Image (cartoon, helix red, strand yellow):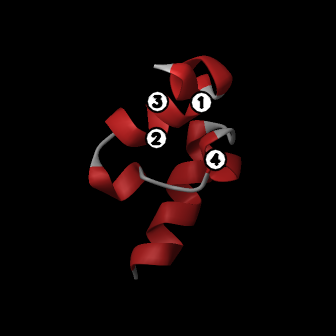
Amino acid sequence: VPLAHRAPRAIKVITSPAPYRHPLLKADMPPAIRNKDQQQTHI
């Protein structure tokens, strides 16, 4: 899969549970920051 080789980060986003599907920039964030942002997003 060429895309997987070009952007391995995308795999994390695609294979993670739905609530954790964020743009690649957010996928690069530490989990704590991502969770904090997720809570604000889903309120």
Q: Amino acid at mark 2?
A: Val
Judge left or right: residue 30 versus residue 18: right
In contact (CB < 8 Å): disc 4 and disc 1: yes
Residue that label 3 marks: 11
- Up/down of 36 relative to 7, above or below: below
Circle 2 packing at 10 Å, graded few (<14), some (14-19), many (20+), is some
Residue 17 x %, y %: 28, 45
Secondary structure of residue under mark 1: helix
Mark 4 or mark 1, earlier in chain? 1
Q: CA distance from mark 2 to mark 3?
A: 5 Å
Circle number at residue 13: 2
Circle number at residue 39: none
In contact (CB < 8 Å): disc 1 and disc 3: yes
Circle number at residue 9: 1
Which residue is at 52% across, 56% downward? 22
- Up/down of 31 relative to 41, above or below: above
Which residue is farthest left? 17
Mark 4 or mark 2, earlier in chain? 2
Residue 27 x %, y %: 60, 43
In contact (CB < 8 Å): disc 1 and disc 2: yes
Q: Amino acid at mark 3?
A: Ile
Which residue is farthest bottom? 43
Residue that label 4 marks: 24
Which residue is at 39% across, 40% downward? 14
Q: CA distance from mark 1 to mark 2?
A: 7 Å
Secondary structure of residue under mark 3: helix
Circle 1 packing at 10 Å, graded few (<14), some (14-19), many (20+), is some
Q: Amino acid at mark 4?
A: Leu
Q: Quadrant of residue 19?
A: bottom left
Residue 43 x %, y %: 40, 82
